[in-house]
Image: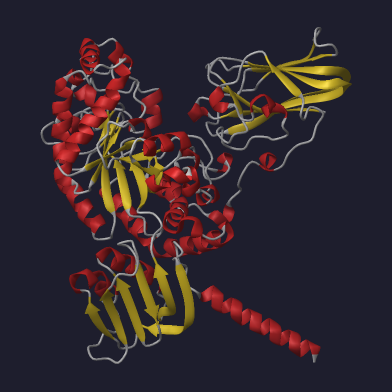
Amino acid sequence: MKVRILFFLLLCLSVRLGVRGQRPCLLPMPRSVEWGRGTFRTDRPFAVVNGAGREGEPLLRFFAGDAVREGAARRVEIYRREVGPSPEAYRLDIGPDTLRVYAAGRLGLLRAAQTLAQLRGRKGLACVRVDDAPEMAWRGLMIDVSRHFFPLTFLERQIDLMARCKLNRLQLHLTDAAGWRMEIKRYPLLTQVGAWRTEASWKTWWNEGGRRYASPRTPGAYGGYYTQEELRRLVAYAEARGVTVVPEIEMPAHSEEVLTAYPELSCTHEPYRQADFCPGNEETFVFLENVLREVMEVFPSVYIHLGGDEAGKASWRECPLCRAKAQELGLDSTDGLQDYLMARMGGYLAQHGRQMAGWDEAASTQLPAGAVITVWRGRDEAARAVGAGQQVVLCPGSHCYLDFYQDAPPSQPEAIGGFTPASKVYAFDPAGFLPDSLAHGLLGVQGNLWTEYVATPSHAEYMLYPRAWALAEVGWTGRRRGTWTDFRRRAVDYARQLRREVELEAFDLRGERGERPEALHAVEHLGRGAAVTYALPYHPRYAAAGDAALTDGLRGGWSHGDGRWQGFIRGRRLDVTLDLGRVVEVRSVACDFLQSVGAEIYFPSSFRVSLSADGETFTEVHNAPFLPHSDPRPAVRTEQWKSRPRRARYVRVEATPDARGGWVFADEVVVR
């Protein structure tokens, strides 16, 4: 009898698990889902009642291949009705005989159609009630097509993939030193010269190739650009899927390609010498306005991104025109000309009914009303932008840079550095990024794919997904989202489905190695908690836990910016002394060092350990060179002295920088 009861319980459990396993994979997870029983069969006759007019056409197309029969008893009903505060809100009510869709307009009906596509099985649509709306208005991806140029078909494919997971902004980074990618008819040299370079690999071109431009007819020239007609087609393609394309035209920096084609717009008027436009020259503004006029003719987006990041400004300080302009404006220095340039160009857009977007360096009280700041650095910059009256789209490098490694670097293709697995993206809390008093300024989130180390469409997709799905759910659900475990299960199912349907080149979460194991737990040793004296200071940007960082028991992970690695400024050695508090027997001293070539962090050239009982007289016990490490991917190496016991209270550790003069990054000094 007991065996029969146990068998019955196991059978019930297996049936329940089977039903759950058959449920469609929804991503992002809707606001409210109530599963029913049965299926609305699309292979059996049903009528479609379109009460939404032309705005219901996406849903009509969705059912176009099914058994639609006028007058059939079973019905699909489409209605225009307010169902939430967002234009993307929608409601689905699916029963075995009736499927109803409600939304206020076209965008909501599009989002409903995208959810219906995820609900569709082999025989029809699972019975369910869905009430849904996004938490954030801007849910985007930025794709850099300057460093490496991708064909229009690739961008169309990404728009399809974005729409499926309800991402709604595609920011195109069209211009940068590595190539100008948009046809500007008034300035043909931008594409005749600025769109082509001598090396296909950005890394080679930037580090070894002399950063030279070329004619498209030059043997071996690499590059390309989009014609205005091609971009118009892309805009229309995206608009039909509920995605807005936001163009980015960089200024005042990252403009080497422009200033080689048109050197008169730089402070020195010499090609290959400048990265920044000359803001003291009125011809600069004539040029920028003419370019933006053509950009606005192609892109109907309300927002036009003007860059504004990482301006060196060095040439401005010596430029007579810049110095005169700063004096005319009453500025303390020529550095203030960046705010002037960004505000002036933002004002030009406003005169034409558009609004500027810019990176967080562009934030200032001078910008026109309605400007949006894409924050890539941190909380302070986000707060400063909102305090200056701007709305912010959060894309901090800590969570939203999709060019960083997404798994243990030794297992991955070379990337620029960093470590941002999908779980970290999913853990991003935009609402916690701003204080409550500034929460009104949060417009949305965005993932950024810079392509210095991403040369092909397949590699780009590998870097985008599944991390873009994680960010899509962050933006759609906000703090309502569920657990990483649940999302990971859905992402694995979704990736399997898309590999089958469209041969998606996504990173496979099933084989993920994860964080560096040593970073997952604290280490106990004689030096834990010891006071540390620094002969030379660490850099404040990479302070980790400050003076306690090397003895707090915590070791660094794969990213140099994880808050555990302590960084020592370029060319400056590590030289620290630990006070163990009393004389003890010391058998070994070890320290981890990080190398991340993309961030100019190198293993030191030598490692030295000295011991002392009194803090005055030190005896060197170890002085060894580091073996070369040629792999450009981030790596961690533990250097150790180990010998017979020596009595000591003070342990001095020194590491000499690499001959290339980069940074030295170290974590825990482990004393045993």
The answer to whether 604 appears left or right of 455 in the picture is right
Identity of the residue furthest to the top in this view: 617
Is residue 442 visible to the viewer in this orientation of the structure?
A: no
Residue at figure coordinates x 37%, y 43% from the top left: 392
Residue at figure coordinates x 58%, y 59% from the top left: 485
In the rendered image of this protein, does residue 334 appear above or below residue 461?
A: above
Q: How far across and down, in percent of the image, does residue 463 sit? A: 45, 46
The answer to whether 117 appears left or right of 541 in the picture is left
Q: Quadrant of residue 210?
A: top left
| Residue toward you, 413 or 345 | 345
Q: How far across and down, in percent of the image, does residue 343 sit? A: 24, 31
| Residue toward you, 220 or 308 | 308
| Residue toward you, 552 or 435 | 435
Q: Quadrant of residue 62?
A: bottom left
| Residue toward you, 284 or 559 | 284
Quadrant (top left, top right, bottom left, bottom right) of the C terminus: top right
In the rendered image of this protein, does residue 291 appear above or below residue 510?
A: above
Identity of the residue furthest to the front in this view: 437
Residue at figure coordinates x 24%, y 60% from the top left: 240
